[in-house]
Image (tube, rainbow, N blue to C red):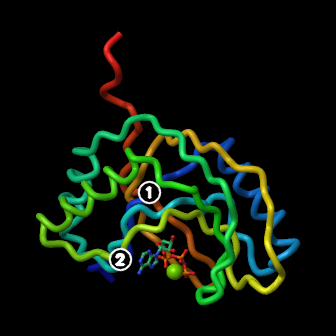
């Protein structure tokens, strides 16, 4: 059957060293908050969530991704939180790095201009580390993680019976085409 919609989102994808650090943080949190650790290959930070997007929108989404200029940015994930309502344990920055705020705003404006729907709630930058967490087990203290953001991507989430995996439909490097004058 031809797929007419895909579940899509723009996200930051960690490099392998950051991915390993995030996975280790997830293992530490799991000792206190339980739940199910995210698979390391699925660790990401959502920038804009589109949900079910029509297949015909893909070209516009790839053009929108390619039109962004994301400078190399360090995102400091300083603390863990456990969100009672959604039962997820997450790592968050104290403040979102300004270039990432610009990227989110620019993607949202591009989606708006293209007439595409997306989740318009305020962006709460976080990396989900655990699902089905028990959030009543007190505070978690972790060393902060400095994530040198190297790329963002357009991901499609694909579900099979037992798991979810994200497929990158487009990837764009940070700092690719410009930088301070030398
Ligand atoms: P599952 O829902 O099966 O547990 P998942 O949450 O990993 O899998 P998706 O639901 O496709 O996969 O979500 C992909 C990413 O988008 C996740 O980071 C998720 O937290 C985020 N996300 C999902 N729904 C929304 C939404 N309505 N608004 C903002 N972000 C969302
Ligand atoms: Mg979900």
Q: Residue 165: image x %, image y %?
A: 55, 69
Q: Residue tagged by mark 2?
A: 121
Q: Is the C-beta of the residue carrying label 2 under 8 Å from the nearest atom of ligand 1? A: yes
Residue lying at 53% horizontally and 40% vertically, measured from the top left: 74
Kind of element beneath mark 2:
loop
Q: Quick check: 114 above or below 33?
A: above
Q: Residue furthest top?
A: 182
Residue lying at 35% horizontally and 24% vertically, measured from the top left: 179
C-alpha separation, residue under disc 1 versus residue under disc 2? 24 Å
Q: Residue tagged by mark 1?
A: 168
Q: Residue furthest bottom?
A: 85
Residue lying at 38% horizontally and 44% vertically, measured from the top left: 99
Q: Residue 138: image x %, image y %?
A: 82, 78
Residue lying at 66% horizontally and 54% vertically, measured from the top left: 78
Sequence order check: which comes first, mark 1 or mark 2? 2
Kind of element beneath mark 1:
strand
Nearer to us in this view, 156 or 33: 33
């Amino acid at each position: 059957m031809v797929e007419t919609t895909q579940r899509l989102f723009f996200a930051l994808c960690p490099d392998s060293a950051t991915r390993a650090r995030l996975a280790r943080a997830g293992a530490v949190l799991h000792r206190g908050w339980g739940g199910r650790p995210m698979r390391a290959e699925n660790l990401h930070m959502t920038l804009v969530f589109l949900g079910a997007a029509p297949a015909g929108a893909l070209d516009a989404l790839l053009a929108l991704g390619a039109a962004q200029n994301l400078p190399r940015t360090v995102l400091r994930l300083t603390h863990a939180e456990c969100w009672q309502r959604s039962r997820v344990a997450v790592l968050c920055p104290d403040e979102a790095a300004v270039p990432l705020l610009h990227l989110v705003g620019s993607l949202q404006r591009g989606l708006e201009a293209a007439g595409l729907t997306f989740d318009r709630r305020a962006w709460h930058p976080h990396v989900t580390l655990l699902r089905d967490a028990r959030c009543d087990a007190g505070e978690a203290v972790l060393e902060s993680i400095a994530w040198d953001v190297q790329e963002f991507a357009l991901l499609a989430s694909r579900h099979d019976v037992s798991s979810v995996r994200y497929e990158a439909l487009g990837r764009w490097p940070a700092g690719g085409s410009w930088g301070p004058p030398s």
